[in-house]
């Protein structure tokens, strides 16, 4: 019975991850208020799985002991508790407590999103297993491919999801996929693409590389079409982290060259299409590499690099470690970036091209007026009483707090921002020093465990996804479309980095090592059947969440 219950809870946790990581991003039934639609559906989905796993706990299911060893001193646990407590305190003392509970003054979420994602984190940390990672990562790849295709079709006004059926929505914003506008899509891809790309880079066989290669090709499409600096920043950070580790070899570089070649191909195609047919939305920052003078040489260099390294591998030569060069390159990139930013802002008279100047000079107009939001948010926090600086103004209250701070100096541009477009600055303003310190402690404690366990199966892609998200958060916002995915990935990282369970001593010493047996056909069928059941459970729960959300959260609709 205990073994069956353990198997049930592990499969349920896998279904939970599949539903949130792969199905929830595709869920949509109303564009009129995308924020509340996504928020209520995700809350209901978390509620269903939490009740189920809670019931399993009530009848005897228990998490492996090593996952909660030394609970009182585990920074990953007390920092999460401190983060939830700081958010609750900020909500109680909020300018508008009721709005802060649900995040009604921002992009939805508030205290409730922190609480239900905290419970979801506990569910995954307690019951998820590492055996189903390949299945999950393939699902993430399929979902990312579908979102990339929908996004691309909507650029050309081919609307498969009813994004433009409501003319009010069409006039208010541009919706490119089931995740809504470009920034939300960029945030999702910043989380999903490191997982998709790493699965292809580290695939052990040619067959698995071909399987993961298809989502990787569509991931390259996403880089070429999604108009967002945040995505470029997130993927760039993940790449720098990857090339610094000791397992970065010519094998990964060889496959990365294929991804880069696919990107140049997509970027050139998109550049040509924008010049010849009607398209909507801005041009992605990386898509500027799609001009023929850049894309063609870039693709040829990548293909030549792949050919040379593939020929070397076919001759049976040992793959070379490239981490030393990767660390040197990372150091050069970071030093140059800091030096360029410092020079452009400290010496405004430098003769820089207009495009470079707009990228480097931090002023109110920087990043589609993100500079205005940053200045308003920080000055509002800095000019607050000491206790407000400590506990914040409350989740989702930026617009209200900025309006009170600015008074008659409030500008129409300031009034357009409901969030700071910088998660860390937003956290400082809304939950104060306490909330920001707790969140940073939570992030750092998990990443330390992740980097310390990099070589374990599944750790590297999850760490890369989290690093990408945390980097893009510097210029982006926390939304209910993506933040629940991130919290479950933190829970999965805690599972993957937990101390291994003690192995029972063998009954008798083995005299000679035997080769592990290959899975038989019945075993494969059993595995496929199990994954089919998990998928069905995830689909049914997502469908139930979509139906129940209007009943449970009618007061938000």
Image (cartoon, rainbow, N blue to C red):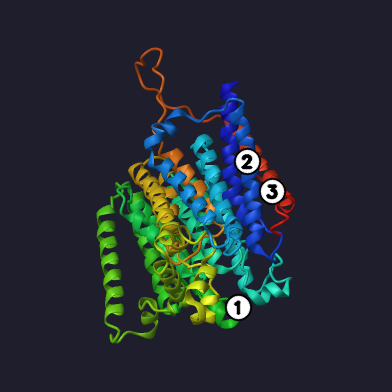
The mark that comes first in sequence, 3 or 1, is 1
- Dot 3: what SS? helix
Q: Is residue 227 left or right of residue 153?
A: left
Q: Residues within 10 Å of mark 3 (few under 14, many from 20)?
A: many
- Helix, strand or loop for disc 1: loop
Q: Nearer the viewer, residue 456 or 489?
A: 489
* Quarter of the image where one finds residue 241: bottom left
Given residues 516 and 98, the one toward you in this image is: 98
The residue that label 2 is drawn on is: 49
Q: Are marks 3 and 1 in contact (CB under 8 Å)?
A: no
Where residue 89 appears, x then y in whole percent?
A: 50, 52
Instruction: State the CA–CA distance, disc 1 to disc 2.
Output: 41 Å
Q: Mark 1 sits on what residue?
A: 279
Q: How many residues crowd around disc 1 within 10 Å: few (fewer than 14), some, or many (20 or more)?
A: some
Where residue 396 appears, x then y in whole percent?
Answer: 55, 62
Q: Is label 3 or label 1 in front? A: 3
**Answer yes or no: do the residues labelled 1 and 2 have beta carbons within 8 Å?**
no
The residue that disc 3 covers is: 545
């Amino acid at each position: 019975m205990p073994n069956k219950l353990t198997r049930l809870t592990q499969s349920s946790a896998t279904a939970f991850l599949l539903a949130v990581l792969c199905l929830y991003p595709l869920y949509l039934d109303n564009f009129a208020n995308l924020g509340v639609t996504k928020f209520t559906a995700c809350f209901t989905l978390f509620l269903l799985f939490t009740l189920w796993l809670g019931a399993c706990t009530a009848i005897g299911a228990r998490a492996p002991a090593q996952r909660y060893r030394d609970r009182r001193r585990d920074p990953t646990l007390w920092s999460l508790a401190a983060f939830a407590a700081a958010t609750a305190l900020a909500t109680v003392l909020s300018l508008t407590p009721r709005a802060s509970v649900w995040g009604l003054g921002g992009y939805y979420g508030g205290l409730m999103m922190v609480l239900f994602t905290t419970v979801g984190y506990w569910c995954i940390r307690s019951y998820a297993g590492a055996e189903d990672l390949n299945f999950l990562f393939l699902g993430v790849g399929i979902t990312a491919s579908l979102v990339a295709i929908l996004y691309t079709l909507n650029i050309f006004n081919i609307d498969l999801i009813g994004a433009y059926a409501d003319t009010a929505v069409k006039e208010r914003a541009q919706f490119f996929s089931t995740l809504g506008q470009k920034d939300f899509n960029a945030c999702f891809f910043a989380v999903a693409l490191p997982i998709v790309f790493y699965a292809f880079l580290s695939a052990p066989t040619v067959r698995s590389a071909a399987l993961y290669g298809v989502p990787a090709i569509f991931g390259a499409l996403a880089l070429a079409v999604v108009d967002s600096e945040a995505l470029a920043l997130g993927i760039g950070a993940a790449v720098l982290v990857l090339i610094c580790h000791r397992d970065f070899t010519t094998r990964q570089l060889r496959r990365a060259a294929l991804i880069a070649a696919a990107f140049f191909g997509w970027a050139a195609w998109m550049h040509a299409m924008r010049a010849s047919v009607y398209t909507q939305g801005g041009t992605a920052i990386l898509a500027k590499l799609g001009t023929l003078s850049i894309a063609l040489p870039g693709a040829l260099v990548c293909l030549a690099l792949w050919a040379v390294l593939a020929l070397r591998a076919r001759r049976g030569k040992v793959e070379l470690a490239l981490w030393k060069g990767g660390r040197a390159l990372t150091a050069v990139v970071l030093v140059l970036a800091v030096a360029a930013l410092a020079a452009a802002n400290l010496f405004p008279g430098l003769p820089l091209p207009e495009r470079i100047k707009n990228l480097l000079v931090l002023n109110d107009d920087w990043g589609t007026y993100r500079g205005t939001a940053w200045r308003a948010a920080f000055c509002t926090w800095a000019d607050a009483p000491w206790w407000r600086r400590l506990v914040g103004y409350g989740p989702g209250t930026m617009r209200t707090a900025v309006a009170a701070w600015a008074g008659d100096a409030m500008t129409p541009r300031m009034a357009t921002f409901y969030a700071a477009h910088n998660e860390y600055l937003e956290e400082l303003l809304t939950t104060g020093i306490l909330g920001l310190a707790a969140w940073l402690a939570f992030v750092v404690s998990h990443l330390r465990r992740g980097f310390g366990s990099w070589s374990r199966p599944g750790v590297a892609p999850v760490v890369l996804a989290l690093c990408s998200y945390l980097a893009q958060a510097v210029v982006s916002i926390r939304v209910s479309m993506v933040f629940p995915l991130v919290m479950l990935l933190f829970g999965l990282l805690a599972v993957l980095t937990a101390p291994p369970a003690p192995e029972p001593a063998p009954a008798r010493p083995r005299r000679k090592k035997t080769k592990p047996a290959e899975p038989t056909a019945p075993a494969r069928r059993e595995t496929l059947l199990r994954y089919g059941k998990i998928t069905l459970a995830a689909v049914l729960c997502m469908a139930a969440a979509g139906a129940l959300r209007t009943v449970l959260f009618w007061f938000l609709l």
